[in-house]
Amino acid sequence: MGHAQPRALSSLVADAPSSFGICISIRITSNRLRSNAVRASSPSGTANTLAPSKFSILEVVNSVVSLQKGQLLAHDIEVVIGGKDFEYYGSRPELQQCLLNLVSNSKDAYDEKNVKKKVIRIEINPCTITISDNAGGIDSENMERVFEPYFTTKSHEKGTGLGLYMCKAIIEDNFGGKLMLENVDAKNGRGLKITIDLTPVKS
């Protein structure tokens, strides 16, 4: 099957947790962005190959949760992973970077809300990955703007307004997939559901 070729992305800032030692600059290209993603997935901080490869989506999700474990525990956030694993052919570090940003966004959303039981659910199914929380969702007036560069509802210290913009560009331009958001009524309260639509490797 064919896969979309990466396109250059300029004037982006990777909105990832600083604890992962990711180099951030105001003007970067897609090559710099992919290099940052590799550092996030490499404990030593050294860049591994970015060539597309076949990998397990569940393994990537587990690695993201492991990297975020300390911060999630500190914020008393439970992570539930379910569904059925599938394999994908593409850039694993880029996908991992996107998931790091999305899980981090859910974590930050709880800081603004008084939620007793904080839960992030990650569901893996053939072709899709969904990330859901019960942190109150996004106000309707902001929903259409969240993918705009530099738009953020976070404080200046926490967000640059480029995390979702970057994720959407990678998933849709580099992976040929789709990134979608919607407010949902979760079991433990209203929240946000993020869907990444991918295509599994054909055996």
Image (cartoon, rainbow, N blue to C red):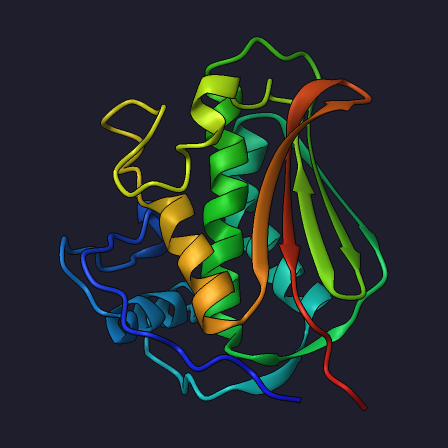
Q: Name the foreground residue: 114 vs 124.
A: 124
Which residue is painted at 77% across and 57% down in the image? 124
For the residue pair 178 and 79, the one nearer the viewer reads as 178
> Residue placed at 27% from the left, 73% from the top?
8
Taking the image as drawn, is residue 105 in sight? yes
**Image location (x, y in percent) of residue 202:** 77, 87
Q: Which residue is found at the position 50% from the left and 79% from the top?
A: 4
Residue drawn at x 62%, y 65% as measured from the top left: 60
- Which residue extends farthest right? 84
Task: Give the percent coordinates (x, y) of residue 56.
Answer: 70, 74
Answer yes or no: is residue 41 visible.
Answer: no
Quarter occupied by the N terminus: bottom right
Instruction: Name above or below for residue 160 compared with residue 15.
Output: above
Q: Is residue 18 above or below residue 1?
A: above
- Between 23 and 9, the residue placed more toward the observer is 9
| Residue 142 pos. (x, y %) | 43, 24
Q: Quadrant of the C terminus?
A: bottom right
Mark count: 0
Left or right for 116, reference 26: right
Q: Is residue 55 left or right of residue 107?
A: right
Identify the image quadrant of residue 2: bottom right
Residue 10: percent from the left, percent from the top?
A: 21, 63
Kindly indicate the quadrant of the structure image that contains residue 12.
Answer: bottom left
